[in-house]
Amino acid sequence: MANLAVWLMALVGPAAKKILVALGIGLVSYAGYSAIADQVRSAVIAQWGSIPASAVAILSIAGVGEALGIVLGAVATRSAIMAVERYAKLSS
């Protein structure tokens, strides 16, 4: 029974350490990418607010606001994918 416990600890110990280290680095990477995506979103919203009202009305009819939402969603998704890819590389 003692040999089984030693074997299980030898098996699980290094894997748990790798997982915890990779999760920490993945979390930091995601936080960095998320901060950049938030800055991009804030800059786009600030510039959208500086456009004259008549131009905003025309752009809204054309669907530019929805297009910007799609692009910003893609930026956020890409940042999440980059964090997961980095996590996968570090855990190997």
Image (cartoon, rainbow, N blue to C red):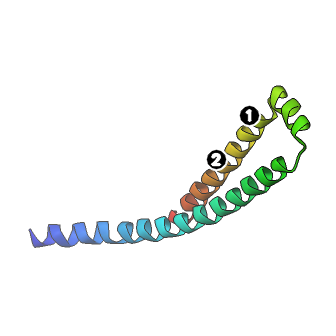
Instruction: Name the residue nearer the viewer: 4 or 57.
Output: 57
Locate the N terminus by quadrant. bottom left
Dot 2 alpha-carbon crowd within 10 angstroms: few under 14, some 14 to 19, many 20 or more: some
Q: Is residue 11 above or below residue 85?
A: below
- Residue at 55%, 61% in the rendered image: 87
Q: Amino acid at mark 1?
A: Glu
Residue 13: name its quadrant: bottom left
Residue identified by numbered label 2: 77
Instruction: Name the residue nearer the viewer: 43 or 86.
Output: 43
Instruction: Tell me the element at label 1.
Output: helix
Instruction: Name the residue nearer the viewer: 79 or 57.
Output: 57
Q: Amino acid at mark 2?
A: Thr
Instruction: Name the residue nearer the viewer: 59 or 84.
Output: 59
Name the residue furthest left: 1
Residue identified by numbered label 1: 66
Give residue 21's position: percent from left, percent from top: 46, 71
